[in-house]
Image: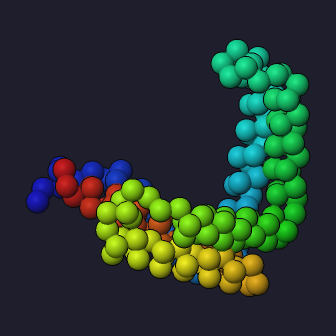
Amino acid sequence: MSTKNIRWSSIIIGILFVIVAILAVSFPIQNIVAITWLIGIFFIANGIMEIFFRRLTKAFVGISGGWTILLGILNVIFGLLLIIFPSAGSTFIVYVFAFWFIFSSVLGIFVVTPEERTSKWYHFFSVLINIIGVIAGIILLFNPLLGALAVSFFVGVMFLLIGINYIFDAFAH
C-alpha cells in the first residue's frame, strides 16, 4: 500500500479519539465532570439562542416571545449551575438517566409493538431487555457513583470505536 493512499488526517483524528477514550476510562470522575461542564455549556448556548431568536420562534412555531425568553433564561441559569456546581450536576445527570431508564423500560414492558405481536421470541426479548433497564435504573438510583462510572466508561468506549473507525477509514482510501 502506498502512503499516498493513506488519509493522514483520519489517522490523526483517530489517534486523538483513542487517546481521549483511554483518558476517559482512566479518569472516570474527571470525565463525568467534563461531561457535566459540556452539558452546562450547551444549556447556556441554547438559552442565549432562545433569548436572541425568540422572534423567529414565534414566527415558525407560534410560541409567545415571553415564554421563549423565560425558557432561555432558565436554560442559562441551569447551565451556569451545572458549571459552578459540577459534582451536584453530575449526580443530577446520573439521576436523570436512572429515572429515564426506569420510566422508558416500564413503558416498554407494558406497550406491545406490532413487531412483538408477530413474534413471541421478539416480545420475550423486549420484555427481558426492559426488565434489565428497570433494574439498571434502580441500581443507579441507589448508587449514583456507579452511574457516573458507567457513563464515563460508555463515553470512553464510544470514543474508542469512533477512533478505530477513523483509523480504518484512513487506510480504506
> In the rendering, at what x and y percent does residue 141 appear?
75, 78
In this rendering, position of residue 120 left or right of residue 84: left
In the image, what residue occupies the spot 74% across and 84% down? 143
In the image, what residue occupies the spot 47% across and 79% down? 128
Q: Is residue 55 visible?
A: yes
In this rendering, position of residue 6 left or right of residue 51: left
What colour scheme has been applied to the protein in the rendered image? rainbow
In this rendering, position of residue 90 left or right of residue 112: right
Residue 42, placed above or below residue 117: above
In this rendering, position of residue 91 left or right of residue 5: right
Residue 80, placed above or below residue 101: above
Q: Quadrant of residue 26?
A: bottom right
In the image, what residue occupies the spot 40% across and 76% down? 125
> In the rendering, at what x and y percent does residue 15 appear?
41, 64
> In the rendering, at what x and y percent does residue 90 appear?
76, 68
Residue 171, placed above or below residue 88: above
Q: Is residue 32 visible?
A: no
Along the line of sight, the residue nearer the viewer: 122 or 48: 122
Along the line of sight, the residue nearer the viewer: 59 or 87: 59
User: In which quadrant will I find the N terminus?
Assistant: bottom left
